[in-house]
Amino acid sequence: MSVEAVNEHVSDVCAAGDPSEAPGITLTGLVFETAGGLRRALAPGIESELGLGGLALEVLVRLERSPGTRLRMIDLAAQTGLTPGGLTRAIDRLANAGFVCREACPDDRRGAFAALTPLGRTRTDEALRRHERDIEALIAGVLDTSETETLVALLRRLRDRVRPEAARVTGDSEAPKTVPPS
């Protein structure tokens, strides 16, 4: 069955009043199923490369993509969706591994930055190379370059709508006000 035929069927069913077939329900279900499948397929490679869970890679990538390879803890918590306590524990594990350090915030005595160490940058780069190979092997032949770019743009728009804090950075005199979206 073609994509057009499926879409036509879904539209017909929705018009008939079956809410379980509504496009929004289908979209959300597919996004959740895909995210879960990707997590299950990719997590073992991340864990073996870093010796830490997949959440560690998310934190490291967000730091890697940030100006000066650091973020205020409050912004990192908002971007990852972690509670302050959860982020503290994650940063403690990464600091114990030598991947990050905490830096004082000159504008806020109570605030702190999480920053990548040189070892953290090296290990993040290694892990990302492995992660990219694993992703390519998993999705090879599913999407072409144009489709991948379109999907990334659409998912960014959706992410920005449902979780705008994922790219949040508070004012910092030493860093730009925005971080490239992940």
Image (tube, rainbow, N blue to C red):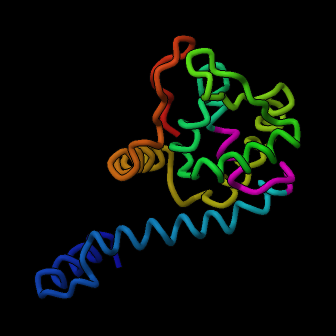
Q: Is residue 51 above or below residue 123?
A: below
Q: Residue at x 78, y 30 (%)?
A: 101
Q: Main secondary structure of the magenta part?
A: helix
Q: Which of 119/142 is in front?
A: 119
Q: Residue at x 32, y 48 (%)?
A: 161
Q: How far across and how far down the image is residue 181, in percent? A: 48, 36
Is residue 59 part of the magenta span, yes or no? yes
For this orientation, the residue located farthest to the front is: 109
Report whether 14 appears left or right of 26: left
Q: Which of 154/160 is in front?
A: 160
Report whether 21 appears left or right of 68: left
Q: Residue at x 74, y 30 (%)?
A: 102
- Residue 6 appearing in the image: yes
Magenta-colored span: 48-61
Is residue 35 part of the magenta span, yes or no? no
Q: How far across and how far down the image is residue 116, in percent? A: 75, 29
